[in-house]
Amino acid sequence: MKENIVIIGGGIAGMEAAKQLLCLGYNPIIVEQNDHLGGHVSQWHQLFPDMTPAQDLVRRLGEEISEANIFLETTVSYVNKLKDGYNVMLNNGVNIVCRALLIASGFKLFDATKKEEYGYGVYDRVITNSDLEAWFNGKQDPRIPDKPARVGFVHCVGSRDLKAGNSQCSKVCCVTAIKQAIEVKEKFPDAEIYCFYMDLRLFGKKYEDFYINAQRDFGVHFIRGRVSEVGEAIDGRLQVKAEDTLAGKPLKVTLDMLVLMSGMVCNPQATEIARMIHLDMDDDGFLRSRDNVYSIIESNRPGVFYAGACTGTKTVPETVAEARAAALGIDAYLKSL
Amino acid sequence: MIDRIPSGFHPFVLPFMIGMVFVLLYCAYGIVKIMIQLTAEDRKKFLISLVTPKTLLKNIKDIFCDCLLHVKLWKRNKMLGFMHSSIAFGWFMLIVLGHIEVILFIPERLHTFYYPIFFNYFVAENDATVAGSLLFFLMDFFLLLVLTGIALAIVKRIRSRIFGMRRTTRHSLINHIGMYALWAIFPLRLLAEGFTAHISGGSFLTIPLNWVFRQFLGNDLNMLPTWWAYSIALGVFMVVLPFSRFMHIPAEMMLIPMRNAGLKIRGARKGFARVQVYSCPNCGVCIDACPMSVSKANIKDCTVYLTRQIRRGNEKRIAEISDKCLLCGKCEALCQVGVEGPQLRVMQRSLRKYALEPDYSNIAVEPLVEAASGSKVLYFSGCMSQLTPEIGRSVESVLRKAGVDFTWMDRDGGLCCGRPMATAGRLDAARAIVEKNEKIILGSGADTLLVSCPICYKMFRESYDLPGVRVVHYSQYFSGLVKLGQLKLEKSDICYVYHDPCELGRGCGIYEEPRRLIGLSAAIAEADKTREESVCCGGSLGSLSLSFEQRRKITQGALDNLYTSHADAIATACPLCKATFARYSDRPVRDLAEIIDAQSTGYKQTER
């Protein structure tokens, strides 16, 4: 009989790990709280830097793990440590005993209403990066005007922001904003696009090219300076005040739509599980890996492994790579017992 | 009663005399110095108040109630009240009764300072002193009272929690010397009077004690040493007094008339500020009061340590303590003496020199006056409300519903009220902004200035000269609209706990209106510490140096206090409190204006 391995979270990390564990001859059991697999990626339209359709990735992974046990709309009620493993109790009454547990609970999008000065939930024309992706995917959104003349993107919403309680960089927002700016420009060729950033951290392969494209081929305006406040004019348009720190001048623009690049915070479910089996938490609110250089996928408890954004902000390729590493890590761990 | 010692003198009185003369000279010098340091205007004001019968009576009453009976302290904490009043009032009565005894029995010795203090040593009882028995009884009674107070003081030093104080001050060496001397004075007096009671007479305390002593001592050899010890304890206490916390005893007697005369702190270290510093009794009530004391690291930044460092002249620590403070005003509200900790700090900050002073002269007032003109009601939302746009929108919506004709003064950007500059101690820069705003407000022709931010509201109330303009916070204004029937509120079933913003509550004394409005639009619960004891949210503009991490702890402490009410949501009436709480709160945080907007209908709408 194949050995059970519980994977908490059915995003791309959980799916990829399940696929590898199947190959290695285990019986992965995915516990996913939503009614579908794929996590945040399944809600995304296209992935940078090659504009890969996100759905393709999720579909392909889904096909490859058809043999895995998958519990949708299920959460973990309780985990307790046994002598040589863990007992995972699900909210549907199922009890699973396993020797290895993989946490792939991912991140939660920062709640943009917490930055009230940007007006999310207050003004009619302020949306987040995830709202925009949903609209790209065909979901109706009354907040997005038919023919916007000017669209703004605010970087670092709830990232690198001590006041918001998050000091970490969310890594993907810089390049996501560029990607979304290009996509918006493609939809509305006449619109002027403004990106308000404090730094552009374009570290990944092809990111810099992407940035140059956005400026050269799409005419996106990049303004270095944080948005200080957003007001609403009588006609519903937005008045954005910012500082252009390169020009050294305060700036005021009227926009038809503002997109907030909400950052990543740790999924609260991970925090809860961490409490149950005494996993260490980091200062940034994410789970703490055994070390951040060599053992990112390992926890401080035997048999508990991590993959993806539960230990910090990650890109898709990083997450996938970690999921594979975690599968191998689990295999090596179980063989060593 | 007869004089026992013909010369009427004994060298043991010398320590007391030296101490007494030293203290009197020191205080006289201090009074002269402080009077010189006052501005001419303040000095005149103060001197006039001293001869005005009304303030004079108030001074006497306040000194009697606060310095001797400690009425305020009784109201706050009965144990502490009893402890302080028994020592202060008991001692006072011992001195008064000592004088009465001298006047009654040996009036010719009244000119000596020491006779009323050491009366029992110098006299012998005779059969004719029947009237004395009541006096002797009273003397013993008040001595017992003082001794009880001292006993409580000793217990308090060891276990302050019995007195409801979690933390007390860590005293300096000189304070300890003064304190031990004070503790020693009265037991020594009891012993001394006990040893002499068979000669000088006594009452229920001293006579039995004398009997006990005589049972196993059988001689008077102990008499003189104990009187010496008593005198030395008094002498030490008085010599140490000007350099210890006990300086608060004479200083407070100066503070009260100065405050009643309406003086304000004008300098950082001199004049009234100096009196305030010396009036701090180092009791440490401000330590538990301070919202920063949730993290142990900040305990030494409370007002009690500020006054200590100012007395020591430790500039580095003065700057640190002054910069860190949130200026929430809780220490001042709870201070029994009324030391104005926040204002003292602002004045210390004002000593700092800046390389660049801001220049506002290029801001043209005229276009702003024009934008503000047109209505009788002028609404000022302030910078903080720009960061919490929901508040301004709600105020606007409520005013529309109630059919109020108003102009939004800073809707499209306006000037700051000046308070951040004022709290940073940059008083001239603040003044420049204030003058610009005064011109705009007075030029607009409005008769009501409606303010939604308590930070601005306090500034407008205290630092602006706006003749003919009524400055109101929206909680007051909306209460008025409800009373006039222009606004109707409907109850929802959400239960709110109201957080008193520092500037609105302690700062401006508005506690009732917000509660009344919430009561009309929802259910209301109270937190553990509320009203003048409300805990600062930690977001205050007042602090110049607290880190986010330190502020987070303060916010968590304030939230924990609010959570004690088990309410569904938190209501407040300050944009800064709202933004700060919203960051960490586990339940919704809403501004009063938002609640009212959601639950109200205007007069016109109800008519339809």
Image: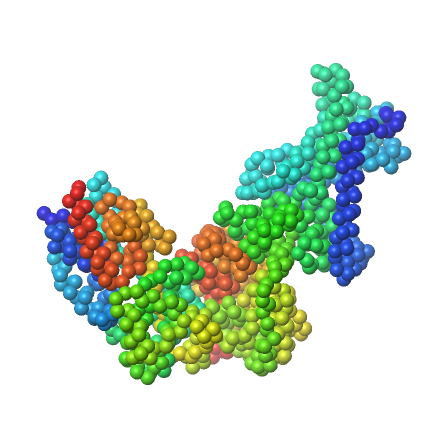
Q: Residue at x 62, y 71 (%)?
A: B432
Looking at the rendered structure, the number of numbered marks drawn on it comes to 0
User: Quadrant of residue B185 in the image?
Assistant: top right
The quadrant holding residue B417 is bottom right
Residue B73 shows in this picture? no
Image coordinates of residue A315 in percent, x first then y, are: 27, 62
* Residue found at the far right of this picture: B108
Percent position of residue B458, x then y: 60, 64
| Residue A143 can be seen, yes or no | yes
**Relative horizontal placement of residue B594, taking residue B59 as reference (left or right):** left
Query: Picture coordinates of residue B381 (x, y %)?
Result: 53, 71
Image position of A44 with respect to B527: above or below: below
Q: Which residue corresponds to the image point at 48% horizontal and 77% vertical from the top-left? A: B605
In front of the other: A189 or B52: A189
Vertical side of B57 occupied by A108: above or below = below
Q: Is residue A178 left or right of residue B252?
A: left
Q: Left or right: where does residue A8 sit relative to residue A153?
A: left
Work out whether residue B507 or residue B432 is closer to the camera in this orientation and state it. B432
* Scheme of colours in the image: rainbow
Q: Position of residue B553 (x, y in %)?
A: 46, 52
Q: Quadrant of the N terminus of chain B?
A: top right
Q: Residue at x 19, y 49 (%)?
A: A330
Residue B536 versus residue B358 in the image, above or below: above
Q: Residue furthest left?
A: A1
Q: Is residue A306 left or right of residue B328?
A: left
Q: Nearer the viewer, residue B2 or A146?
A: A146
- Residue drawn where x is 52% and y is 51% of the image: B292
